[in-house]
Every structure is written in structure tokens, then in C-alpha cells.
Amino acid sequence: MIQAIMVFNNHGKPRLVRFYQRFPEEIQQQIVRETFHLVLKRDDNICNFLESGSLIGGSDYKLIYRHYATLYFVFCVDSSESELGILDLIQVFVETLDKCFENVCELDLIFHMDKVHYILQEVVMGGMVLETNMNEIVAQIEAQNRLEKSEVSPSPSSALPGRRGGGDPPSHGYNGRTDSCSVI
């Protein structure tokens, strides 16, 4: 079972942290720091599997990670998970992010955190792997985007000049334009 998923940059700033086991916030922060230091001190030519730190559970847990550009993607798993399967899952997650954000970068993880969490929930929920087929994941993300766009698109009555929100009177300072929201 997956115990935690962490994404942090080369400086140790967490960009995505998801625990599937309950820890107090102070312990979570210690785990992220310890994990970063364990992964950072490893050479790029060394295996991407290592024993997890003492905070998560010792020798029964492993850290499996990949380093892409400025980001480390780290999964903490118990002994029942396949190391190569988790490496493949990290690859699927990163490729899905790349497809959804068109060449994903660290800023996408910062400014679109809700979408990143939604993508992660399509892949892993409750510490269990749900989907590994990138095309299925992307199809679900696109369906969610269409649903969100249909919910925020203006109704015909709100597009009329002098009308807002389907018939509400204009507020003080209203300039006659309809306000619209766009979902990214």
C-alpha cells in the first residue's frame, strides 16, 4: 500500500504532499524534510529505491523516487508493493501531468494545485492504485474539465446588457459588461 506521495523541488520545497496514513502535521513536516535529505544525498547513478526514514515505519517501508528536471517525485510504500510497478506509476503520473498541462513544470504544480490533486486522485486513492492507463486518466480529466466549463458558462439571460446572474439588478458601479469566469 502507498503510505505517502511527496513532490518537492531541488531545494526541498514541498509542491505536493499526500499522506494516506494519519500523522500529526509536525511529524508530516519532519517526514518531508527527512525524505528530502535521504533522496538528495543520493547520486543520480544509484538505484531509485531506498529504505524509508525512521519516522514512517522503518525497514518495512521503502522510498521509491524519480528525479525530473527540478522536481523529485517520491512514493513511500510498504513491502507489499512492487518497486518497479511504483516506478512505472510515477512515470504514468508525470506523463499524465505533462499531457494535461502541456509540458508540465513546477509552476503548474503551484498554481493549479486543485487540478494536480484531482489527477492524483484518478491514479491513487486511499493508498491504493486505481488507474494506470494514461488515456483513461486523461479522458476522465477532460470530462471533468467539460463539466466545469458547462457549469460556469454564462446563461443566455446573463449575456444581455444590464443583466447579471439571470435577472439580478445591476449593482452600483456596474459597467454593463457581464463578468465571466474561465476554468483552466
Image (cartoon, rainbow, N blue to C red):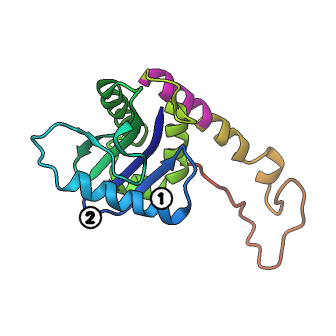
Please tell me whether residue 139 belongs to the stretch shown in magenta. yes
**Main SS, magenta residues:** helix
Relative height, residue 120 to residue 35 (above, below): above
* Mark toward the start of the polypeptide (1 vs 2): 2
Please provide percent x and percent y for residue 28: 47, 59
Taking the spot 42% from the left edge, 26% from the top edge, the residue there is 80
Q: Which sits in the foreground, 176 or 62?
A: 62
From the viewer's perspective, is the residue at label 1 or at label 2 nearer? 1
Disc sitting over residue 11 in the figure: 2
Look at the numbered disc 2 and give the secondary structure of its residue: loop
Asked if the residue at tag 2 contacts the one at tag 1, i.e. Cβ–Cβ closer than 8 Å, the answer is: no
Disc sitting over residue 28 in the figure: 1
Is residue 163 in view from this perspective?
yes
Q: Which residues are magenta?
A: 134-144
Taking the spot 22% from the left edge, 38% from the top edge, the residue there is 48
Please tell me whether residue 90 belongs to the stretch shown in magenta. no
Taking the spot 37% from the left edge, 50% from the top edge, the residue there is 7
Look at the numbered disc 1 and give the secondary structure of its residue: helix
Crowd band around label 2 with a 10 angstrom C-alpha radius: few (<14), some (14–19), many (20+): few
Please provide percent x and percent y for residue 154: 74, 48
Spatial CA distance of label 1 from label 2 is: 18 Å
Disc sitting over residue 117 in the figure: none
Q: Amino acid at mark 1?
A: Gln
Please provide percent x and percent y for residue 129: 49, 27
Is residue 61 in view from this perspective?
no
Relative height, residue 48 to residue 89 (above, below): below
Taking the spot 22% from the left edge, 49% from the top edge, the residue there is 69
Q: Amino acid at mark 2?
A: His
Q: Which sits in the foreground, 98 or 128?
A: 128
